[in-house]
Amino acid sequence: MSDAPPAVEWPLPEDGVTESLVATCGPNDLWNFAALGLQTGDRAAEGDDGDAGGETGAGEPTGENGPAVVTARTWGRTRTRGNFERRGGGVVQFVDDPVAFVDAALGVVERETPVHPAAAAHVRVDAERLDAGERGGTEWVDWLLRPREAVVRRRVVPTVRRGFAAAVEATVHASRLDVPSYDEAELLSRLEFLASVVETAGGERERTAFERVDHHTDWRDRL
């Protein structure tokens, strides 16, 4: 009989891309929070030519047995990439608060502890570099995320909220505004549309989150 500890399971769907936050410990010993796209299933196996603007996934195949393989891609020389390289891992977490997500995706959020108050679950991971390259003048690195500990802090009833989805999608387009390989007019048009979705379908937190998108990027001033 094996004495190996049981495999740690990800609280994730079996395939597709799941948006998360990741906390990584910086040189100042504070935990930096950023958005990170996690890939499982076929997308993780095939990699992603990816048009996501923040941190999004790509990598190696899932195993037929055992826990799902989860991969992620960092774009540019971000704090997340640097901290993965220095520390070898971090804490992935899942939030349903759009304000927390927007601030982490577009701003600089540092805390003394690695688990965000808005996290419903978190997974402590080791990050292994898989591959690297460059596209459109931006470097990318693919990471294999190996779970070491998973904690579910609270369970929630799943809901489909257009306003929340629009706020998350806005962070992708807003993060590309200063990337030369993207057309600014097209990005601003998409942000205008997403703002209208939040206005008609979003609640108070979604509207606040979209105000934070403008705070971090001043995208309305570019119209």
Image (cartoon, helix red, strand yellow):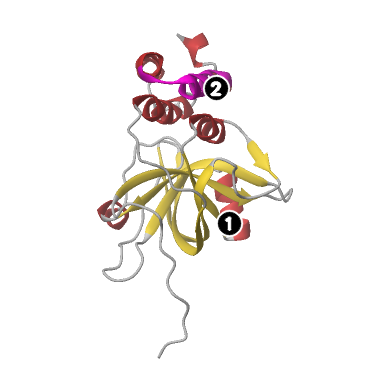
Coordinates of residue 213 in the picture (x, y in percent): 51, 22
Magenta stretch: includes residue 203: yes
Answer above or below: position of 147 versus 220: below
The type of residue carrying mark 1 is: Glu
Residue 77 sits in quarter: top right
Helix, strand or loop status at disc 2:
helix
Q: Residue at x 27, y 54 (%)?
A: 46
Badge nearest the viewer, 2 or 1: 2
Give the residues drawn in magenta, as a range: 201-215
| Residue 76 seen by the camera | no
Q: Quadrant of the N terminus?
A: bottom left
Answer above or below: position of 153 versus 110: below
| Residue 34 seen by the camera | yes
Q: Residue at x 47, y 63 (%)?
A: 147
The type of residue carrying mark 2 is: Arg
Q: Which residue is mark 2?
A: 212
Disc number placed over residue 85 in the picture, else none: 1
Q: Residue at x 34, y 62 (%)?
A: 68
Residue 50 sits in quarter: top left
Disc number placed over residue 27 in the picture, else none: none
User: Is 44 on the left or on the right of 131, as rendered?
Assistant: left
Find the residue positioned furthest to the bottom: 1
Coordinates of residue 15 in the picture (x, y in percent): 28, 52
